[in-house]
């Protein structure tokens, strides 16, 4: 099994504080209302530490890292 | 075997077990609530997780504004819908069935409860009723489950998906097909449609799969005047040019969605129609997710302004996939298809409505 991880945002929890996009602009940009738009695809290995920081620093704990999601 | 013309009889349920899911798979049945998800896949996922405690949520919320087919079916064939629910309960080893019916659809509810009263005591004992609030998103799977759990018909974050909690959420028309399949070995080769907008006889019809939109329109008495376009599949469907839509065979792959076929007459301004529907969809956001709450409002406002067309297209692409449920996706697909089909009108909307001298 691959260890590829993706960022996921809990859209209900997310308040659009925007810290994540400051920490990890390589993978996260903000829309016109300040809510994150994620770059599709797995998190490159070298960005893993920054992704972890973005997750830990989110004031509402809306971001997480997941293995590629599968239905059923 | 057809759904609406058949007599709604109360008869002993056929014996079905886990292998019935293979029959479902072979029948190719897909959900008729709008998302067209393969029914067998959903049942298998619930069966794997059921420990005799699955829940069958019979989805008759029908929050789609023009759709009438679910309540028509519940009024005409309540036993057939109940059969589908009890068959699901047996196959998936459920201990509970919830009838989730739009709170304003009293005739449908009374019909279902009337039929239920004739069922055996053990059958009646596992069924309860929940009145779905009259909101667009109330019929979304997670919203339905949230309502039954906590009385709030708002979508929740996935995962967990309902099937991961051994909850089967299934549209009433799908369940009627399930029952017909279990009884006769064949799922009805038909689909329920609601003809709406500029058609002579708006209302619900049942057509064979493969029927073209044009043939279905003829059964609704044809268009009242020259049609400009057809909205295939309701507000979460897509717009098609009238001539192209007329030739479209309604197959499982055609994107029938919830079955609403809305005809836009050539005399109406399509951009104004689209903007009105976008305002409705924006107001129907459950206001939980920023991209949906802010994005749909902005999209609705920008619709009628040609100068905003660039932003309109960008926002429509950006809101997709960024809600807990598919509300923003549905609205964005609807709008994107409109921008394509009505490209000229979107570009020159101000000119269309310019005050001009007539004499």
Image (cartoon, helix red, strand yellow):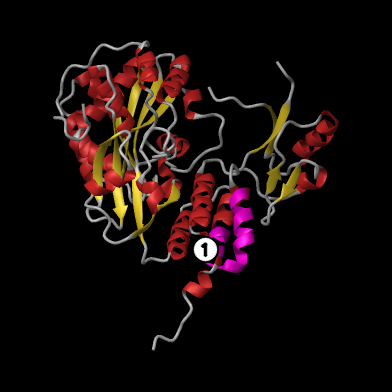
Chain letter of the residue carrying label 1? B
**What range of the chain is rendered magenta?**
B297-317
Say which quadrant the N terminus of chain A sits in: top right
Q: Is residue B143 magenta?
A: no
Give the vertical position of B167 relative to B322 (above or below). Answer: above
Residue B109 in sight from this viewpoint: no
- B124 to the left or right of B268: left
Residue count near mark 1 (Cα–Cα under 10 Å), binned few <14, some 14–19, many ≥20: few
The answer to whether residue A4 is visible is yes
Q: Does residue A40 sit above or below B310 in this rendering? A: above
Residue pointed to by mark 1: B344
> Which residue appears farthest toward the bottom when viewing the image?
B359
Across and down, in percent, residue B205 comes to: 24, 42
What secondary structure characterizes most of the magenta part?
A: helix
- Horizontal and vertical percent position of residue B56: 36, 26
Residue B19 picture quarter: top left
- Of residues B185 and B140, the one drawn nearer to the viewer in this rendering: B185
Q: Is residue B316 magenta?
A: yes
Spot occupied by residue B317 in the image (x, y as percentages of width and height): 61, 49
From the viewer's side, name the closer residue of B110 and A60.
B110
Q: Who's the residue at 30% across and 38% down the image?
A: B211
Residue at 26% x, 60% y: name it. B224
B121 or B186: nearer the viewer: B186
């Amino acid at each position: 099994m691959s260890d590829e991880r993706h960022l996921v945002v809990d859209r209900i929890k997310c308040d659009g504080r925007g810290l994540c996009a400051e920490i990890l602009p390589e993978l996260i940009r903000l829309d016109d209302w300040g809510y994150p738009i994620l770059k599709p695809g797995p998190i490159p290995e070298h960005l893993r530490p920054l992704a972890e920081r973005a997750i830990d620093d989110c004031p509402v704990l809306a971001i997480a890292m997941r293995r590629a999601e599968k239905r059923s | 075997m057809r759904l609406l013309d058949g007599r709604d009889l109360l008869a002993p349920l056929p014996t079905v077990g886990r292998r019935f899911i293979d029959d479902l798979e072979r029948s190719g049945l897909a959900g008729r609530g709008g998302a067209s998800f393969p029914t067998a896949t959903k049942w298998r996922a619930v069966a794997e997780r059921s420990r005799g405690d699955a829940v069958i949520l019979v989805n008759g919320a029908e929050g789609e504004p023009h759709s009438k087919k679910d309540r028509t079916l519940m009024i005409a064939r309540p036993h057939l819908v109940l059969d589908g629910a009890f068959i699901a309960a047996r196959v998936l080893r459920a201990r509970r069935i919830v009838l989730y019916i739009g709170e304003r659809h009293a005739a449908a509810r009374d019909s279902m409860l009337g039929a239920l009263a004739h069922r055996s005591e053990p059958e009646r004992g596992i069924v309860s009723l929940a009145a779905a609030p009259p909101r667009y998103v109330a019929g979304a799977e997670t919203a339905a489950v949230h309502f039954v759990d906590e009385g709030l018909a708002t979508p929740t974050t996935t995962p967990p998906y309902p099937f991961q909690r051994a909850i089967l959420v299934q549209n009433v028309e799908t369940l009627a097909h399930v029952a017909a399949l279990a009884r006769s070995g064949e799922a009805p080769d038909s689909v329920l449609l609601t003809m709406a907008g500029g058609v002579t006889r708006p209302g619900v019809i049942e057509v064979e799969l493969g029927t073209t939109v044009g043939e279905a329109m003829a059964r609704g008495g044809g268009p009242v005047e020259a049609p400009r376009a057809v909205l295939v599949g309701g507000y979460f469907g897509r717009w098609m040019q009238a001539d192209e839509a007329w030739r479209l065979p309604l197959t499982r792959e055609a994107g029938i969605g919830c079955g609403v076929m809305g005809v836009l007459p050539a005399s109406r301004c399509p951009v104004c129609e689209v903007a009105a529907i976008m305002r409705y969809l924006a107001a129907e956001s459950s206001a939980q997710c920023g991209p949906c709450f802010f994005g749909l409002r902005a999209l609705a406002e920008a619709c009628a302004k040609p100068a905003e067309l660039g932003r309109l297209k960008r926002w429509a692409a950006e809101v997709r996939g960024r809600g807990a449920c598919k509300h923003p996706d549905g609205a964005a697909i609807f709008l994107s298809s409109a921008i394509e089909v009505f490209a000229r009108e979107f570009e020159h909307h101000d000119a269309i409505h310019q005050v001009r001298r007539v004499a």
